[in-house]
Image (cartoon, helix red, strand yellow):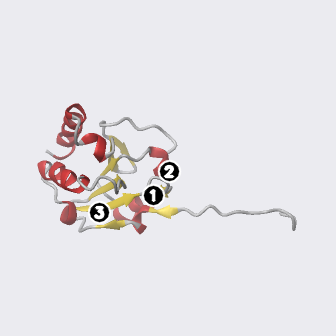
Amino acid sequence: MFSDTDLLFRVPEKSVLDHVSGGFARNVAILVLAEPEYPGNWPFLTKVLAAAQLNLEKDTLFAEIHPDDRITFLPLVKEKHPGHILVFGLLPNQLGFTIDMPLYQPQFFYGSAFLFADRLSALEPDKARKAKLWQALQLLFL
């Protein structure tokens, strides 16, 4: 067991559900790296989703995650059962994955299609990255 001199630390595990908002009508979850220095991210994301026939507020559960946050996506998958999880700018290990996930290639885990992409501020000015994202979104939604 433990002695009186042992120090025990409990690492807090934050759930992505603590950060979400939205109607979730189309069973889509969106996790985005917070970039407060880029206020143009939201109009850009809204346009990207509209092209895939999704409305950010009505059709998705949306969470903005800060770079130093370490959260788990498992409660989202277990409680909400999203069909699709779009991740912009977050690394898999920030969500509790212990594997690499290729960008712009849908991967199926836990009953959901995951799509990892670059952060929104890198996507918007880059036509090649936007084309890769669009191809992946077409596979998933159109």
Tag 3: amino acid? Leu
Rendered position, 43 above or below 101: below
Q: Which residue is mark 2?
A: 96
Q: Which residue is mark 3?
A: 61
- Crowding at dot 2, Cα within 10 Å, few <14 / some 14-19 / many 20+, comes out as some
CA gap, disc 2 and disc 1: 8 Å
CA gap, disc 2 and disc 3: 19 Å
CA gap, disc 1 and disc 3: 14 Å
Image position, residue 53 (x, y; %): 12, 53
Depth check: 33 or 111 in front? 33
- Return the mark for residue 74: 1
- Return the mark for residue 139: none
Q: Quadrant of the C terminus?
A: top left
Image position, residue 141 (x, y; %): 18, 47
Question: Could you tell me if residue 129 is visible in this image?
Answer: yes
Image position, residue 2 (x, y; %): 83, 63
Q: Choose mark 2 or mark 1, whichever is in front.
A: 2
Element type where label 2 sits in the image = loop
- Tally of marks: 3
Q: Residue 75 is drawn in which quadrant?
A: bottom left
Residues marked 2 and 1 touching at CB (< 8 Å): yes
Q: Residue furthest front?
A: 37
